[in-house]
């Protein structure tokens, strides 16, 4: 019962997706009623045709019945074709509305939603959910109503024509419905299992493809292929068991239908011999009973589909209803003139309630200042900077930009003032021109080229066969690490945001690339408030201020000159650097 309730609640929540297509849906209903009525009239015409047969009977009666039948068949086909056209128009429209809502919600969800799920799984679930729901929607608006109508009309006509034959028909009618209702519970449970399995299989496979280089380097291709295929085969076994069960149920139902026909033919034949019924009446009954079990089965099929739809709806609403704790406040402001002064005030944050990854951090960065953040891996450096972009909000304390609490700023407005260059540069499989202009789609070609020049990227881009129209490859794999970084720097330069977050690459570049990247970075940093998660001593020493972060706390801060002389954690870190240029990531003092 609770099951049915939640299905109903979910179904009701889909009404707004259909609302704009109200007229179309009513047209579908109207046309389906019309076609169902025409279907119900057909056996009556047959009856008058057959009853009109006999030696010496009036030929005009036969011709009238045949003419009416031809007119009915033509009208029925025309109405059917128009119904199909309107139906698909409505279906595609509703489908668009759902897709729109799901994609909107997906893009607006906080990163925490994606951290706990995998991307391939989300996409699989979304596709299966929407397709499954749309099939059900189609089923309901195109079959339920005409089936019901046909049932009422045909049962009434049969009752009027002959009550004895009517009772025979009615005796057989409920059986397929009862069998269908009994089968639906297992079908729904099966659909749930399938949805979860496909989500898991494709989710994992997506991860495998995204990390194919790692898979190959550990020669795990065969193992991954087997894992995928085993998953697919196992799941298909469940599908096959379901098909066997569904087919048996279908076969049982058609057996009942055919037995019903035979019973009508036998009893009807007997009544004709006894002179208690006409041949036309028996023909009409055979027509009705053939058409009666179809809608009966259709209705039970629809009932099963509606129950399965609840599984699809839960997949859709898992995305739409996902709590979005980082929604902008209604009165959140859009930034206008940003200088770039940042202040963290007693900020604390944890990904879960048990551990605090950032603890009581207070720091101030003047506009244009460069702050290097150093500390062992896992100290909370990336987390601290993700709070600055409001990917999460602090659980205590506050962060201010030019004195304005970030929580009162519209998220998009804040992020448009921050550029980010990560060591793990994300490029899209698009042209280099579009990759550079990703954050500034309105940029002119001259601006793109100028940013590429300032980022030391223009020369290598121009040397490529298609120049700025060359494709970056998936994730930018057609470029070297150093080239990818320079494209990312050009992208950040073009965005021209007053605040910059840099995650300095730990991967070694060859000397020339390194020089080009460093030069480009110097251009990028100039005049911006910069937070750099630093690994190179030159970067750290060149910063206006250094923060040493350990276990989520700032344990030291100051200039290189100040910190290196003291008996500091920082001084010990630097001393530990055997080759003097790069700080190891796991520097434990
Ligand atoms: P750093 O950048 O200094 O290497 P991070 O900020 O990435 O450190 O991580 C700090 C701590 O937070 C680590 O213990 C890490 O395991 C944890 N952490 C990072 N991201 C997540 C996450 N999405 N969910 C849960 N814990 C996380």
Image (tube, rainbow, N blue to C red):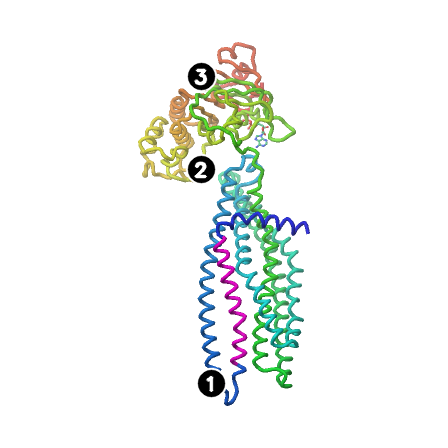
Q: Distance between the residues labelled 3 and 2?
A: 31 Å
**Magenta highlight on residue 28:** yes
- Looking at the image, residue 84 sits to the left or right of residue 175; the answer is left
How many angstroms separate mark 3 from mark 1 (CA)?
108 Å
Query: Do labels 3 and 1 touch, CB within 8 Å?
Result: no
Q: What element carries label 2?
A: loop
Q: Magenta part of the protein: which range?
A: 22-49
* Kind of element beneath mark 1: helix
Dots 3, 2 in contact, CB < 8 A: no
Q: Of marks 3 and 2, which one's residue comes earlier in the chain?
A: 2
Quadrant location of ligand 1? Answer: top right
Quarter holding the C terminus is top right
x and y, in percent, of residue 259 in the image: 64, 74
Residue 459: x and y, percent?
A: 32, 30
Q: Mark 2 points at which residue?
A: 475
Dot placed on the residue nearer the N-terminal end, 3 or 1: 1
Residue assigned mark 1: 59
Residue 542 circle label: 3
Q: Position of residue 171 (x, y in %)?
A: 67, 71
Kindly give the residue lying farthest to the right in the view shown.
Answer: 1
């Amino acid at each position: 019962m609770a099951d049915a309730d939640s299905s109903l609640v979910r179904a009701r929540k889909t009404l707004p997706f259909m609302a704009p297509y109200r007229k179309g849906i009513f047209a579908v209903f109207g046309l389906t009623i019309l076609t169902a009525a025409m279907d119900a009239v057909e056996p009556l015409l047959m009856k008058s045709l057959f009853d009109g047969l006999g030696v010496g009977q009036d030929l005009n009666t036969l011709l009238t019945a045949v003419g009416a039948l031809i007119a009915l068949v033509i009208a029925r086909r025309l109405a059917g074709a128009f119904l199909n056209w309107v139906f698909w128009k409505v279906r595609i429209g509703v489908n668009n509305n759902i897709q729109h809502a799901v994609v909107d919600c997906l893009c607006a969800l906080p990163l925490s939603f994606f951290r706990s799920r995998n991307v391939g799984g989300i996409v699989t679930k979304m596709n299966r959910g929407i397709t499954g729901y749309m099939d059900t929607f189609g089923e309901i608006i195109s079959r339920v109503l005409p089936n019901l109508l046909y049932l009422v009309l045909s049962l009434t006509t049969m009752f009027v024509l002959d009550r004895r034959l009517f009772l025979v028909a009615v005796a057989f009618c409920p059986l397929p419905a009862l069998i269908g209702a009994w089968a639906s519970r297992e079908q729904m449970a099966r659909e749930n299992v399938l949805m979860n399995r496909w989500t898991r299989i494709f989710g994992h496979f997506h991860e495998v493809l995204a990390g194919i280089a790692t898979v190959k380097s550990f020669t795990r291709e065969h193992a991954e292929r087997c894992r995928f295929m085993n998953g697919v085969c196992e799941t298909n076994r469940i599908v096959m068991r379901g098909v066997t069960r569904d087919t048996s149920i279908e076969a049982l139902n058609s057996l009942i239908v055919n037995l019903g026909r035979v019973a009508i033919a036998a009893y009807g034949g007997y009544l004709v011999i006894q002179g208690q019924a006409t041949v036309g009446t028996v023909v009409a009954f055979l027509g009705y009973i053939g058409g009666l079990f179809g809608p009966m089965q259709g209705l039970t099929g629809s009932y099963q589909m509606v129950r399965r739809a609840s599984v699809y709806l839960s997949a859709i609403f898992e995305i739409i209803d996902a709590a979005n704790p980082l929604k902008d406040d209604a009165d959140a402001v859009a930034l206008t003139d940003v200088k770039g002064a940042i202040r963290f005030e007693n900020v604390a944050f944890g990904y879960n309630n048990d551990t605090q990854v950032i603890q009581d951090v207070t720091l101030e960065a003047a506009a244009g200042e460069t702050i290097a953040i150093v500390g062992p891996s896992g100290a909370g450096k990336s987390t601290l900077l993700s709070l600055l972009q409001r990917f999460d909000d602090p659980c205590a304390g506050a962060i201010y930009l030019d004195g304005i609490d970030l929580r009162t700023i519209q998220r998009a407005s804040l992020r448009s003032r921050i550029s980010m260059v990560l060591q793990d540069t994300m490029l899209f499989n698009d042209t280099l021109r579009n990759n550079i202009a990703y954050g500034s789609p309105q940029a002119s070609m001259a601006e793109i080229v100028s940013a590429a020049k300032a980022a030391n990227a223009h020369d290598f881009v121009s040397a490529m066969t298609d120049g700025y129209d060359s494709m970056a490859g998936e994730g930018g794999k057609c470029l070297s690490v150093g080239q990818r970084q320079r494209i990312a720097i050009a992208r950040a330069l073009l965005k021209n945001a007053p605040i910059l977050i840099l995650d300095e690459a730990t991967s070694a570049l060859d000397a020339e690339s390194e020089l080009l990247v460093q030069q480009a970075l110097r251009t990028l940093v100039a005049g911006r408030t910069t937070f750099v998660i630093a690994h190179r001593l030159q970067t750290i020493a060149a910063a206006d201020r250094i923060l040493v972060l350990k276990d989520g706390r700032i344990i030291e801060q100051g200039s290189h000159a100040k910190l290196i002389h003291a008996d500091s954690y920082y001084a010990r870190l630097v001393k530990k650097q055997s080759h003097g240029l790069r700080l190891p990531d796991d520097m434990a003092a």
